[in-house]
Amino acid sequence: MEYQSEKQVFRSRISVLLIATVFAAFTSASISILRNKAYTEMYVLACPFLLLVFLFTGIRYIISGNTLSFKIGFICGWSVNIADMLSVERSYNPLSAPAASLKRLCIHFPKNKKFPYLLISPAREQDFIKALKRINPNLCVDLPEKKGIWRIQDWDI
C-alpha cells in the first residue's frame, strides 16, 4: 500500500548529559593547552568540537511516502520502508546510532532484513509514532515512560 503524504521532518532529541560530557572533555583538554600557550593546538581541538556540535544539531529523521530516512546536515544516511517495521520500543542502548540522546526508540524489523533494528531519538516522539502508525497501522508500540530522579537519560532538550 503506497501512502502519499508530504514530507515530515523530525529533529533528533539532544541529551543534556551527552552535551555536558563532551563539553567537560573539551574543557579539560583546553585548560592544559591554554596553560602551555599552545594556541595552534587549540585550533586543532576546536575542529572536532565543532564537528560534534554540527552532528548533534543536524540530525533529522524524514518520513516521505512509505520511507523513513535520516540526514545529518547535508549528508544523507540510510532509508527504510516503514511497512517493513514490526515494532517500536523504548531503548537506552548506548550503541552508535544517528541519535543525539540516550533516550531512544528501537525499531525492529523482520529477521531477513539487512539490519534487525534501528536506534533513533526523535524529539517529538508521539508525533513521530503517529506518523509511522498512519503508514503502518500494524506497528506494535511499547513506550512506557519511566520517571524518577535516577533517570538521567531523560534530561533532553
Image (cartoon, rainbow, N blue to C red):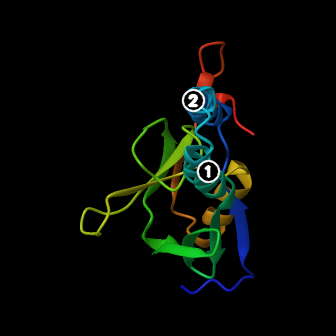
Q: Can residue 142 be seen in this snapshot? A: no
Q: Residues within 10 Å of mark 2 (few under 14, many from 20)?
A: few
Q: Which residue is mark 1?
A: 43
Residue drawn at x 42%, y 59% as measured from the top left? 86
Left or right: residue 11 versus residue 43 is right
- Relative height, residue 6 to residue 30 (above, below): below
Classed neighbour count for the residue bearing mark 1: other residues with Cα under 10 Å, few (<14), some (14–19), many (≥20):
few
Q: Which secondary structure, mark 2?
A: loop
| Residue drawn at x 68%, y 49% as measured from the top left | 125
Q: Is residue 22 left or right of residue 131?
A: left
Q: Earlier in the sequence, mark 2 or mark 1?
A: 2
Can you see residue 120?
A: yes
2 vs 1, front mark: 2
The numbered mark at residue 27 is: none
Q: Which mark is residue 36?
A: 2
Residue 112, x across and y down, in percent: 24, 68
Question: Which residue type carries mark 1?
Answer: Tyr
Image coords of residue 89 (percent x, y): 50, 44
In this rendering, the answer to whether 148 lies above or below 65 is above
| In front of the other: 117 or 30 | 30
Tell me where residue 151 sits by quadrant: top right
